[in-house]
Amino acid sequence: MGAALNSRVVVLGLWVVGAAPAIVDGFDLGGLLTIVYWVGIGVGFVGLMMPGAKALTLARIVVPANAVGLLVASLMIDERVWVTHLLTLAAAFGALVVVLTPAYGERLVDAASYGDERRFLLRPPAWALVYLVVPIWILTVCGALSGLVLLAAQRWVLGVAALIVGVPVAFAGTRALHQLSRRWLVYMPTALVLHDHLALAEPTPMARRSISSIGPAAVDTQATDLTVSAFGLALEIRLDEQVKVPVVTGRGKAAEQMLEAMLVSPSRPGAVLETATKRGISVR
């Protein structure tokens, strides 16, 4: 919990500097857009101070939007404030880099864990990371802001239409991105739980006493792949006895399979193995 708080404090400091009004002062946003800007800052502030997966999703939407927005605004500001401008942009993009790191995401979701529970984020599927995340983020931000921008420009009909269309799009986009923040490998006092709706129809616990080992997967492993094609190092969990697992086989479809070895892809595999050692699970 302390590490998560320290991470949020670091990002919050960068966020406050990155949200400084220096660039806004050099670029006339108009009344409504100024309100929208500060509402966005407030939402980001709340997201950065809260623990949990929802806060992570919020931070990873709002902080990049702030950085990109300030970059665009910086191209239109008075050159006399260029020093403050550079400091503001550096802070905004510093916050962006931090919130996108695996360590920040892991600490935020783990801050909402219960008791002796320890949560580790799973890497997103390669197909989602390459083809979906950025387009969905763009649609989410544009859906939330386009109507307000048009209203600020006194384009009343288009603004109202954009709000009617954009708000549901922003909601759907936020919900889609949030699904990636809810995929975890969870250490519990007596079990290891795979909580991944993309790979399993429901969270699946594996009793700690039944886990024979966990470690980097071999190239020629025969373990069932539950990484959903994520990039990076996969860990192989081997069991002493088979466990029934509801493996997702298609959209809305799942099949019960008896597994004694499976592959998972946490965002920080080294930390997962370190925790396994501390909890008495063999690491090979």
Image: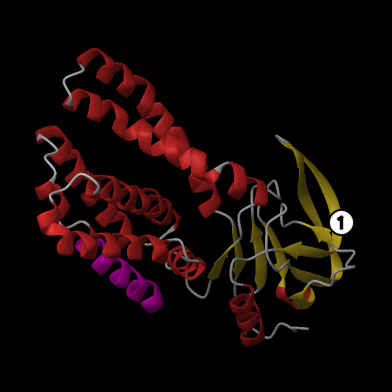
For the C terminus, give its image quadrant: bottom right
In the depicted structure, whether residue 17 falls above or below residue 137: below
- On the question of residue 193 being in view, the answer is yes
Q: Residue at x 48, y 71 (%)?
A: 103
Q: What percent of the width, then of the height, locates residue 117?
A: 53, 71
Secondary structure, magenta segment, majority class? helix
Q: What percent of the width, then of the height, locates residue 275?
A: 60, 81
For the N terminus, give its image quadrant: bottom left
Relative placement, left or right, of 87 versus 198 is left
Q: Nearer the viewer, residue 198 or 144?
A: 144
In the depicted structure, whether residue 185 falls above or below residue 161: below
Circle 1 SS class: strand
Q: Find disc 1 in the rendering and name its residue.
A: 258
Residue 16 lies in the magenta stretch: yes
Q: Residue at x 20, y 64 (%)?
A: 17
In the depicted structure, whether residue 37 falls above or below residue 163: below
Residue lying furthest front:
79
Amino acid, disc 1: Met
Please give the range of residues in magenta: 1-17
| Quarter of the rendering containing residue 211 | bottom right
Q: Nearer the viewer, residue 196 or 100?
A: 100
Q: What percent of the width, then of the height, locates residue 273?
A: 66, 79
Relative placement, left or right, of 51 versus 246 is left
Q: Residue at x 34, y 65 (%)?
A: 94
Residue 138 lies in the magenta stretch: no
